[in-house]
Image: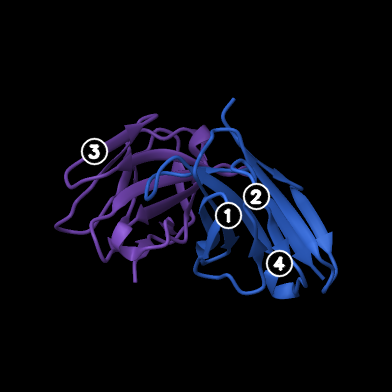
Amino acid sequence: GDSVTQMEGPVTLSEEAFLTINCTYTATGYPSLFWYVQYPGEGLQLLLKATKADDKGSNKGFEATYRKETTSFHLEKGSVQVSDSAVYFCALSDRAGGGNKLTFGTGTQLKVEL
Amino acid sequence: EAQVTQNPRYLITVTGKKLTVTCSQNMNHEYMSWYRQDPGLGLRQIYYSMNVEVTDKGDVPEGYKVSRKEKRNFPLILESPSPNQTSLYFCASSAREYTEAFFGQGTRLTVV
């Protein structure tokens, strides 16, 4: 079945540091890929998405590129802020996998300190 | 404002006492789902619905029921809750199949 693997957290960075959160996937078909963010006490919000190979999703300074050859969708940001502290989830949606569902990774907690 | 609304946000109950978590969306979305979030496991789909009166099991449906009598509402029913159903629950809706979903604020359920 489909699966998503994310790097373990927590990740602790200083403000203005460069961020990378790794995400790799396995899928039956040709999935769409997503990054969601969960701030403390809140639901998940869509951060960015990509629907085909080599697409780059971007939002709020975050970027991720759909790499079919390496089955990856790593999240990057050039300069993080304290307000970026949250849990980040990589997810996929795969028509061939069935069930009209999002398959999530386990989440990576990011802590940004002054 | 487009949103998915769940109630209650927090609930503590006892084993075996039936409960319902409500979910409502105001975006006229066809597709709705329930997920549970557990540490180290991410989010897993419990049930989903493609339209009114059309529902199907997700990955972890045991111990749960759903209904979709109206397009905007998708309640989650635990007829006899057990401690292993202690979790954080999210309702989600989407406009189309296999695309991004919009999530509610979550319901933290504790079964003692």
Q: Amino acid at mark 4?
A: Thr
Q: Residues within 10 Å of mark 1 (few under 14, many from 20)?
A: few
Residue B86, compared with residue A95, is above or below; it is below
Chain with colour purple in the figure: A
User: SS for tag 4?
Assistant: loop
Q: Are marks 1 and 4 in contact (CB under 8 Å)?
A: no
Q: Are marks 3 and 2 in contact (CB under 8 Å)?
A: no
- Share a chain, discs 3 and 2? no
Return the residue at label 1: B53
Q: Nearer the viewer, residue B19 or B53?
A: B53
Q: Amino acid at mark 1?
A: Glu
User: To which chain does the residue with label 1 belong?
Assistant: B
Q: Nearer the viewer, residue B45 or A8?
A: B45
Q: Is residue A95 left or right of residue B106?
A: left
Chain with colour blue in the figure: B
Tell me the CA gap for discs 4 and 3: 38 Å
Q: Residues within 10 Å of mark 4 (few under 14, many from 20)?
A: some
Mark on residue B69? Answer: 2
Return the residue at label 3: A56
User: SS for tag 2?
Assistant: loop
